[in-house]
Image (cartoon, rainbow, N blue to C red):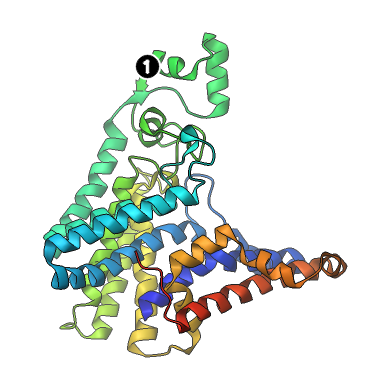
């Protein structure tokens, strides 16, 4: 149950939790809520806030879940059957991700091929395939190799010395007179390496050259091609945590301590590595993987100890409702919007009369709709399985 509760806690901040904190801080002016609200937004580039943990935590949790689901699949269907199931699930989740990002509504050139759900599909599929065939020690070694290999690529492979940002491109066009961006890019003879600025790093440049369709940041994508590699490492950290959780020969309290130790270790290494390879979510840097992974280990330890060891579960039921149907809750939040559903119960005239109180009521009402919807699915055993 701790895993479902943690997944629901993670999703809660995406689909409603952050919104209510922002609205309450706006109308109360509380400095405490202001500090919390500041943590509920992403950093522009380098750095780390709580909201930057939401996505990697979900990928980490997917890795923990793989240990349970893949073991069961191998026992029931053998290795070949488990592989088939992983590939089918990954393909379907990838298609849902494309649909979530707009599908073909803007034509073939407007398809966003890589996004949040696509990254989860890729990372969990690759990590799952590794789990089917490899031992825990080998998985740990592969995780380390991925992080070091990604750093090596980003540090030593050169790319054209052109920053893929609108201002820098405008200056270069004015200097050279070349208005075609691709010709301008190919004509840039000087090359650099080991740079980690926005639009001026290997990952962003590979997206510009090889990622088809629409990019989230015009010239590159925060869920781009190369950064899927360290995302697999994030998922594998979750796999390692999952193997520890299922190791019943180790007492539960000791498992909690080992999760805490792993978390502190990842945070320490990630922090010190960040002085050379900065913590940057948008390129999923190796230091970001370890720093976010460290917090993920610690949160899993807290939830495991409280929910599964001490059996204090009354407080986390709403999170469990969300966590057992996380993808459904996420999709419905985008396609429908829970505050929008609640607005059907209030006239526009009443909302206008209530002023700021009406905005707070809308957000709280949206959360109520969210919890009632999640609870209804849970009580009827309706779960979206891929």
Q: Which residue is mark 1?
A: 190
Question: Left or right: where does residue 204 sit relative to residue 134?
Answer: right
Q: Is residue 239 above or below residue 203?
A: below
Question: Left or right: where does residue 81 sit relative to residue 59?
Answer: left
Q: Estimate the x, y position of residue 118 in percent, counting from the top left.
A: 38, 50
Q: Is residue 142 above or below residue 64?
A: above
Q: Nearer the viewer, residue 192 or 349?
A: 349
Q: Estimate the x, y position of residue 27 in percent, counting from the top left.
A: 76, 66
Mark 1 residue crowding within 10 angstroms, few (<14) / some (14–19) / many (20+): few
Single out the residue that lies furthest toward the top.
177
Q: Estimate the x, y position of residue 327 in percent, counting from the top left.
A: 44, 64
Q: Estimate the x, y position of residue 18 in percent, counting from the top left.
A: 59, 64
Task: Kindly state the secondary structure of the residue where label 1 is placed.
Answer: loop
Does any portion of residue 271 appear in the rendered image? Answer: no
Q: Nearer the viewer, residue 104 or 274?
A: 104
Q: Nearer the viewer, residue 156 or 120?
A: 120
Q: Nearer the viewer, residue 234 or 37?
A: 234
Question: Left or right: where does residue 335 sit relative to residue 123?
Answer: right
Question: Left or right: where does residue 221 sit relative to residue 251?
Answer: right
Quadrant, the C terminus: bottom left
Quadrant, the N terminus: bottom left
């Amino acid at each position: 149950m701790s895993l479902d509760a943690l997944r629901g806690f993670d999703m809660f901040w995406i689909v409603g939790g952050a919104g209510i904190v922002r609205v309450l801080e706006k109308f109360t002016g509380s400095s405490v809520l202001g500090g919390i609200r500041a943590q509920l937004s992403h950093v522009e580039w380098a750095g780390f806030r709580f909201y930057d943990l939401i996505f990697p935590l979900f990928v980490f949790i997917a890795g923990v879940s793989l240990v349970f689901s893949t073991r069961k699949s191998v026992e029931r269907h053998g290795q070949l059957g488990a592989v088939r199931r992983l590939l089918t699930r990954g393909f379907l989740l990838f298609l849902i991700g494309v649909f979530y990002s707009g599908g073909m509504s803007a034509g073939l050139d407007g398809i966003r091929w890589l996004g949040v759900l696509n990254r989860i599909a890729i990372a969990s599929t690759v990590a799952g395939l590794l789990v089917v065939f490899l031992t825990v020690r080998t998985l740990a070694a592969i995780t380390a190799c991925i992080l070091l290999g990604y750093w090596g690529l980003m540090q030593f492979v050169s790319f054209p010395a052109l920053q893929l940002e609108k201002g820098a491109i405008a200056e270069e066009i004015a200097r050279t007179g070349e208005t075609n961006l691709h010709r301008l890019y190919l004509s840039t003879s000087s090359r650099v390496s080991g740079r980690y600025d926005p639009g001026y790093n290997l990952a962003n440049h590979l997206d510009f050259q090889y990622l088809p369709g629409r990019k989230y940041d015009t010239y590159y994508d925060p869920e781009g091609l190369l950064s899927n590699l360290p995302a697999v490492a994030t998922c594998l950290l979750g796999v390692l945590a999952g193997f520890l959780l299922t190791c019943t020969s180790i007492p539960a309290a000791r498992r909690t301590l080992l999760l805490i130790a792993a978390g502190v270790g990842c945070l320490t290494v990630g922090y010190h590595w960040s002085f050379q390879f900065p913590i940057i979510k948008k390129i999923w840097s190796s230091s970001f993987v370890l720093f976010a992974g460290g917090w993920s280990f610690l949160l899993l330890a807290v939830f495991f100890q409280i929910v599964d060891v001490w059996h204090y579960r009354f407080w986390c039921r709403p999170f469990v409702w969300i966590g057992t149907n996380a993808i459904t809750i996420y999709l419905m939040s985008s396609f429908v919007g829970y505050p929008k559903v609640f607005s059907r119960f209030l006239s526009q005239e009443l909302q206008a009369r209530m002023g700021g109180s009406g905005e707070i009521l809308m957000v709280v009402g949206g959360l109520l709709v969210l919890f009632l919807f999640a609870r209804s699915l849970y009580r009827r055993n309706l779960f979206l399985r891929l």
